[in-house]
Image: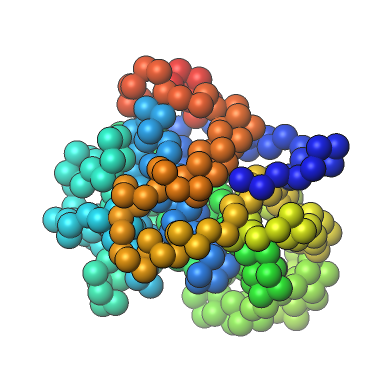
Amino acid sequence: MLKRDAGRAPLGGGSVRASSSSTVVRARSLSWAVAGARGGTGKSLIAAHLGANLAARGWQVLLADLDWGGGNLRTLFGSEPAEYDVADLAEGRGPDTPSALPMVRTGLRLVPGISGFFDVPTVQARMDLLNLLQRMPSHHVVMDLGAGTDAEVVTPFLDADFPLLVTLPDPVGIENTYRFLGGLVRQRTLEMLNLVEGDRLQALRALDGVRSMVELERRADELHRSTPDLVSRVRDGLAGRPIYVVMNKVRRMADLEAASGLEAMARNTFGCDLRTVGAIQFDDRVWIALRKNSAISDWGVASRLGEEMKELVDALLQELGIPLENRTFGVARVGESATARAGSM
């Protein structure tokens, strides 16, 4: 994993804090949401390695393919078609325990993606699925979300304990990250306005493509929905939840300068607390393995990507205050706080 020169500020500008929500008593697993502002960022591969890496440390992990436009996690693991997929779970036709789901690695169970376009459940069913996944007995739930800024992507991303955004260091990647942050602002604004369906559609159109907090305030005024503290509430809601970034397919040290630019832009334009936690180097062997349709179990551990992901997860867990390994091999119990549970693992 590429690192900055000694003496320079660490990626992310310092240590990563665990969000305050991690100390709230809850009856669910710790959730990781992996998203990309556009297709082709490598988010699914990052999500797969994240889930496998957590499981290799002794935790029970659920890896859910929530890319409703066509997930491919099952292919990455070389897994056969399963009895249940995310649509079955969302519509109440699946199990409420991980034991009925395919185990693709020791400690790692996969919730396969949908098999067809018409299998996509209703919006409410998808929201119910997120709650179901987090209530299942496990330590971690890793969600591979779709690309883009639709509500079905940004809502679970914002609500996750650890939102992880995968982007690229090229101009298009930076621009799409900017749009993704605008999508987060739009979604939080819609939630705070609490509109009925007809007004919500009007607001969605008016807020589409918002590019700054100043523009947000102007557009809210145009909707005649402005409240004295709307912008500050949206800003505070975003600033209080760190968004962790992985810069993928990095070819040179100079590419890391894009990380500093992204963090400054997010802070100054949207008030977002963006923190770059790692950079994954471009590796032709990954592309070749994918072209051969090789499962990551055949090449992931020995590849440079596998080693870099291990370093990245090490850094994430250390900075979030979570032990690097689970030494008890117990499953999360109802009623424990996330912090207490992590400390006992």
Q: Is 272 situated left or right of 123 in this image?
A: right
Coloration mode: rainbow
Where does residue 249 sit, x and y in percent of width and height?
Answer: 59, 61
Q: Residue at x 59, y 52 (%)?
A: 280
Q: Residue at x 66, y 47 (%)?
A: 2
Q: Is 114 situated left or right of 12 in this image?
A: left
On screen, residue 35 above or below 3: below
Would residue 114 be seen by someone viewing this image from the given angle? yes
In depth, the one of 11 and 306 nearer the eye is: 306
Q: Is 242 situated left or right of 159 in this image?
A: right
Where does residue 102 sit, x and y in percent of width and height?
Answer: 21, 47
Where does residue 158 sit, x and y in percent of width and height?
Answer: 56, 54
Q: Quadrant of the N terminus?
A: top right
Where does residue 257 sit, x and y in percent of width and height?
Answer: 78, 57
> Quarter of the image holding residue 267?
bottom right
On screen, residue 252 above or below 325: below
Q: Quadrant of the C terminus?
A: top left
Q: Residue furthest left?
A: 83
What is the number of callouts on the image? 0
In depth, the one of 124 and 10 nearer the eye is: 10
Would residue 93 be seen by someone viewing this image from the given angle? no
In depth, the one of 147 and 80 nearer the eye is: 80
> Quarter of the image holding residue 227?
bottom right
Q: Residue at x 45, y 32 (%)?
A: 26
Q: Residue at x 63, y 64 (%)?
A: 168
In depth, the one of 244 and 95 nearer the eye is: 244
